[in-house]
Image: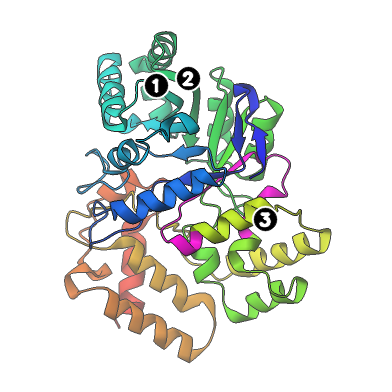
């Protein structure tokens, strides 16, 4: 496994990180982690050189982002038997649910307990954006981070981000951060922090950790045949996951790519790719650019299926509805659109569909992409339920 130094942290980390947001499940709920399979996957990854593990307070929560999830508990158990000493552990402060330094310290202590460790190597302020950043400054977050670093409970300090580029620039310049985590892939060059934000982070010496390298599976599961053909012509036999990960490893501003692997097959493929991260050629980059431009022209909703909008108070399965809606527009073909509507109806019970949206706005407050969900739900219902 190839290693790199993560910016100001000075730490040597694997170029592939194990993201624990989409672990394999053994039931219908996000909290139903298949502990035996997930543990086997994690330990195989570590045995093959992966040494950066990423989780967060709400990952695999049974009841939304205000309730601690099972992901930290899973990691605490999976890293027993000497595995904790082999890895760098990253988790995050839930910025949306703390208002004082006292609350921040209490949350950190609870995370240490769930993770069964006395020290977190990389600690991030989770999902910083306009408003949240200002609230955290007023609440004393920067002082909290210094105190936790001084007493040894955390090591290196960074932040994850979901907002527009000017806000990212303000946050980068607002504290002596050591690393940043952003959404970045060959589709999202101009989205949120985007390529300009990535370059800004590197100019200031920050390590750059990338999340959503395959856009929640969109870049492997939803590329239409005509655009797959563009990539296949450039590099016959290269998988869509290969394209997404290799594109990032070919960018000099990227240090580490987090992959949310939910099957053993996905993990084994990613390990094989990280063992030989051959850089893309100029012709390869041109092919990826063509796919990006043509895809963005078709997508009505820029949803990454992160699930932060859930649970909906009225039970609407928002990411599932948006995925089918996007599929409807990918190709201007009656058969494709009929299949998208069929998928929508089979995957969603009647009380889970877009027409059940109450326009309460709760989901929009939680959406890191800042999507106009309520307004878009009307459009989804008008087409997909017609």
Q: Secondary structure at mark 3?
A: helix
Give how far apart the Cα atoms at labels 3 and 1 are.
Answer: 32 Å
The residue labelled by disc 1 is: 119
Q: Tag 2: Cα neighbours inside 10 Å, few (<14), some, or many (≥20)?
A: many
In magenta stretch: residue 246: yes
What label does residue 246 carry, if any? 3
Viewer-nearest of labels 2 and 1?
A: 1
From which residue to which does the magenta span run? Answer: 244-266
Residue at the extreme right: 282
Is 169 drawn above or below residue 372 in the view shown? above
The residue labelled by disc 2 is: 155
Side of 381 where 88 appears, left or right? right
Counting from the top left corner in percent of width and height, residue 171 is at 53, 26
Counting from the top left corner in percent of width and height, residue 228 is at 64, 75
Q: Earlier in the sequence, mark 2 or mark 1?
A: 1
Q: Nearer the viewer, residue 224 or 154?
A: 154
Q: Residue at x 28, y 21 (%)?
A: 109
Tag 2 and tag 1, C-beta contact below 8 Å:
yes
Viewer-nearest of labels 3 and 1?
A: 1
Q: Earlier in the sequence, mark 3 or mark 2?
A: 2
Is 375 drawn above or below residue 342 in the view shown? above
* Residue 193 found in image quarter: top right
Counting from the top left corner in percent of width and height, residue 209 is at 57, 38
Q: Secondary structure at mark 2?
A: strand
Side of 343 where 45 appears, left or right? right
Is 325 drawn above or below residue 254 in the view shown? below
Question: The C terminus appears in which quarter of the rendering?
Answer: bottom left
Is 235 drawn above or below residue 208 in the view shown? below
């Amino acid at each position: 496994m190839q290693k790199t130094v993560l910016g100001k942290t000075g730490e040597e980390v694997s170029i592939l990180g194990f993201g624990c947001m989409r672990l394999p499940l053994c039931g219908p709920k996000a909290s139903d982690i298949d502990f035996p399979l997930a543990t086997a996957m994690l330990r195989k990854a570590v045995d093959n050189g992966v040494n950066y593990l990423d989780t967060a307070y709400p990952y695999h929560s049974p009841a939304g982002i205000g309730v601690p999830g099972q992901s930290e508990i899973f990691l605490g158990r999976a890293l027993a038997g000497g595995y904790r000493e082999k890895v760098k552990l990253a988790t995050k402060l839930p910025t949306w649910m703390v208002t004082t330094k006292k609350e921040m310290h209490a949350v950190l202590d609870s995370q240490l307990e769930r993770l069964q460790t006395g020290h977190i190597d990389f600690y991030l302020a989770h999902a910083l954006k306009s408003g949240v950043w200002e609230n955290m400054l007023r609440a004393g977050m920067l002082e909290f981070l210094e105190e936790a670093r001084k007493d040894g409970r955390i090591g290196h300090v960074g932040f994850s981000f979901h907002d527009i580029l000017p806000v990212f620039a303000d946050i980068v310049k607002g504290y002596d951060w050591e690393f940043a985590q952003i959404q970045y892939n060959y589709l999202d060059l101009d989205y949120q922090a985007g390529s300009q934000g990535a370059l800004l982070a590197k100019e200031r010496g920050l390590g750059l950790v990338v999340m959503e390298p395959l856009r929640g599976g969109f870049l492997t599961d939803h590329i239409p045949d005509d655009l797959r053909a563009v990539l296949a012509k450039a590099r016959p036999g290269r998988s869509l996951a290969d394209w997404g990960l290799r594109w990032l490893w070919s960018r000099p501003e990227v240090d580490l790519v987090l992959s949310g692997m939910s099957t053993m097959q996905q993990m084994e493929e990613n390990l094989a790719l990280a063992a030989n991260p051959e850089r893309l050629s100029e012709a390869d980059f041109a092919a990826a650019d063509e796919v990006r431009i043509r895809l963005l022209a078709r997508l009505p909703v820029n949803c990454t299926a992160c699930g932060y909008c859930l649970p909906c108070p009225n039970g609407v399965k928002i990411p599932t509805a948006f995925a089918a809606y996007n599929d409807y527009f990918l190709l201007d073909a009656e058969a494709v659109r009929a299949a998208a509507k069929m998928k929508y109806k089979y995957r969603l019970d009647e009380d889970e569909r877009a027409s059940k949206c109450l326009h309460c706005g709760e989901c929009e407050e939680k959406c890191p992409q800042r999507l106009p969900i309520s307004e878009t739900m009307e459009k989804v219902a008008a087409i997909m339920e017609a």
